[in-house]
Structure formats: structure tokens, C-alpha cells
Image: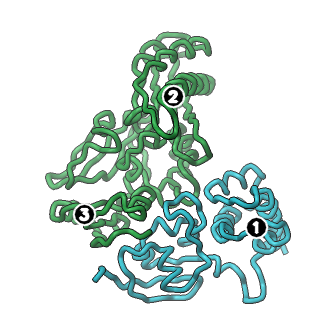
Amino acid sequence: MAETRKIALTVNGRRHEVEVETRYTLADFLRQQLGLTGTHLGCEQGVCGACTVLLDGQSARSCLMLAVQAHGHEITTVEGLAPSSTGLHPLQEAFRDHYGLQCGFCTPGVLLTLVEFLRDNPDPTEQEVRVALSGNLCRCTGYAGIVAAALDAAKRLQGGARG
Amino acid sequence: MKPPPFSYHDPRTVADAVALLGRVENAKLLAGGQSLMPMLNMRYVQPDHVIDLNGIAGLAGVREAGDALEIGALTRQRDLEFSGLVRRRCPLMHEAILQVGHRQTRNRGTLGGSLCHLDPAAELVAVAAALDATVGVAGPGGRRELPFAAFPAGYMTPALAPDEMVTDVRFPLWPAGHGHAFVEFSRRHGDFAVVSAAALLEADRSGRITRVSLTIGGAGPAPFRARDVERALVGSAGSAPLFHEACESLRSIDATGDVHAPASYRQQLAVTLASRALKKAHSRISA
């Protein structure tokens, strides 16, 4: 019987108290135990960025953390971005408008990376956006749509803040 | 792909962590997890015990102590990146940290983890070599200090006993006005360097170079100081042709050849990057 431990954490604003195997990665825990399959697993070695989530507001690879390490912390996954079941986050709207995705596999990680980036850097240059995205591999878009969406989302988010 | 089964421990003090290391067999310390977790996921390592250091208070932080920065082993790379103290007093580390992985990995990755993983091409390892850092180590007999030159025991192997752990690192600072540069070649931004070069230069009022530190990372089993080049440049006025000529000797270094690059390519990179780093550091010397 594999070792387990009880953990308490908040995921997308909802509190969970659950028993996890100590060897479970945070990514597997989110997908398999909480059913939040929006967090994608590509390489499972910290290279592709698809599994990026926010840990207390900071982006992190959920494949490079144990679920037990999230005890007492707050996690945001792509499921936590949209304000309602019908609405989208301004960043998601910008991605739709600029064709910032094709197959969509990398998109959850890209979105969470950009949520943190645009919060810390609300008026970025294109070069800064490209550096921020360097830890997320997209094999479809050539990044042009993603970068355009990120720059447009920065404007939308600033507009929202002003309005 | 899953980590193999292990017993998980999360001690609250360094003493408890060290005691655990002494008590259990085949244990791995988990800090930021940016190297150990991939190795667990791929099952390159199969420890019976994982000792998570993240619950230990007091292991993180940057502070100025005399002419040095004292940095806790559990300090996140992100906190080094955004530390005003690091940027102001240790610009070489700031320039290097921007080339360490990506935001998502710097948010978790730690200084101590990077040093102990000891990847030959890791930027922070090269910075520690460049600045003659001192590594603070806790063990069953108490604390000891290890000069960084003696820290690598071999390829990716720190000179630590199985029941020892790194707690802090002391980076001696160079005086205001020194020149610094960290340059590297990697296939993609954020990758480990194929080869890196870190240069520090100090000059007197007349522009004569009085002190040099030149480190090559990624070329051999661990970053090393190019002592011959350092000696050749002290006392000179410093110029691009002179730097280039002095760095030619690096063409004969004993370099690693692997799937990423043949040895001859790393030798070529060492010459080019060292010369580039020296030029850049020289241009940044201010009176």
C-alpha cells in the first residue's frame, strides 16, 4: 500500500480536504483526483509548460511539485479563469479573437503564465511577451497569434482597470 | 510516468533534516524540485525517502553582511531575480539569473538546489565559482564551510557526506565600479547553456586592470576558473585584441563532447564567449 497523507488546499476558490498518495504530482492530483483535466501534461519533466498552474498567484509547473507540497496553499487552474460558465476571462477572449490557439494543448499553461505576467507587467513590449512565453512550447501557432493575443489582452485588462 | 513509491518527510528544522539523513538510507532532499522532480518522474532516481525542505523556516533570504551577500539555500531563484540587493551589489548574479530557466521554474527553483544538483552548465554554479563563494553545510557534527572551489567532487556530485545539507551560501562582493558580464550560448532562451562565461574585472584610476575573475561553465564536468587568462590580464590596460589573444589558450581545454555539441565546438565557444564576456565586463567598469 503506497503511503498517503491528508492535505487541505484551495483550488479555484474551493477548499478541498483529501487523502493523496505522497508520490502524486500536483498535476496528476488535479487531473485524476479532482477531475480538473484542463491542466495538461506534456513532457512531465518541466520543459513544455502545458501543466503550468498558479501557486499562491505565482506560475509553477504542476508536474514538478508533489501534491502534498500544495498543502495549505492556493492553486488556480485554467478552470478558475472564466468569471462564469458563459463568460470568458479577457485573456481568453483575446486568444479567441486573435486565433491564439489551434489544437489547444498548450493553451492552459500559456494562459496561466500570461495571467501572472500581465499582472506583474501590465504594459509589456512584444519582446517581453516572447521571453515570458519562452517556457511554454506551442507546436501549432508559431506563437504569432499567441503574442498578438497577449498584447491585446494587456490593453483590455488595463482598460478594465481604468473603467 | 510517475515517481516511484517513497516515504515523504517534511522536517521543520535543519537539525531534524540532518538527523533524518543520518537515520534513513537512500534519501533525497527536495528543495525547489526543478531537477529532482523530473528525475523522479522519469525514475532516473528511485529514493526510498524524500525529505522536503520547504517547511524549514529560516533557510531563505538575502542579506548583506560586510563585503558579502549571505543567501539562504532555500531562496527561490525568483527572489534573487527581484532582489534589489542582488541587482545593486551583485550584478553578475542578476545578469545570470535572467538566463536560468523560465519564470515558472524560477518561482520554485532554489539557489541551494541548483548548486547541489551541480549541472556543469547551470548559471548559478558558474556564478558561485566566479565569486569564490563559500558554502555553509550542516551535518551531524555541526556546521562547516566549504570554499566553492572544493565543492564539486566530480560531475554533478557535490563534496557532501550523505548526512549533510547545504544551508547557506556566502558570495563575496566586488567593489562598486567593477565590470561584470555573464554570457552564454544555448539553443533556446532558458535552456541550460552549452557553454557560458562569467567575467569580473576591476581597474585602477589609470585603467590598468588590477583583478580578474573568468569562469567557463558547461565545457567540463564542473565550471572552472581560467586562471592562466586571469593572470595574463592583470596589469594590462585591457583591450578587445588583448582579450581575444588571451582567451585563445582556452581552445585547448579538456572539453566535454556529447549529444548537444562535440568537444571541439565547446572549445571554440569557450574562446569566443570568454573574450566576449571580458569585453563586456571591461566596457562596464566605471570610475
Of A23 and B43, nearer the camera is B43
Q: Is residue B245 left or right of residue B147?
A: right
- Dot 3, how many residues are within 10 Å of its Cα: few (below 14), some (14-19), or many (20+)? many
Mark 3, secondary structure of its residue: helix
Residue drawn at x 75%, y 77% is A89
Mark 1, secondary structure of its residue: loop
Residue type at tag 1: Leu
Q: Is residue B16 left or right of residue B53?
A: left
Label number found at residue B17: 3
Asked whether residue B287 appears in the rendered view, the answer is no
| A3 is higher (above) or lower (below) than B159 | below
Residue type at tag 3: Ala
Q: In the image, residue B93 lies at what x, y percent?
A: 50, 41
Residue at the disc numbered 2? B199
Residue at the disc numbered 1? A101
In terms of sequence position, does the residue under pointer 3 or pointer 2 come before the other?
3
Q: Is residue A36 left or right of residue B13?
A: right
Color of chain A here? cyan
Q: How far separated are the C-alphas under marks 1 and 2?
A: 42 Å
- Dot 1, how many residues are within 10 Å of its Cα: few (below 14), some (14-19), or many (20+)? many
Q: In the image, residue A62 lies at what x, y percent?
A: 51, 69
Chain containing mark 2: B
Color of chain B here? green
Residue drawn at x 41%, y 70% is B2
Residue drawn at x 63%, y 67% is A109
Q: Quadrant of residue B28?
A: bottom left
Q: How many marks?
A: 3
Asked whether residue B262 appears in the rendered view, the answer is yes
Of B46 and A64, nearer the camera is B46
Task: Say how the picture is coloured.
Answer: by chain
Q: In the image, residue A144 lies at what x, y percent?
A: 79, 56
Mark 2, secondary structure of its residue: strand
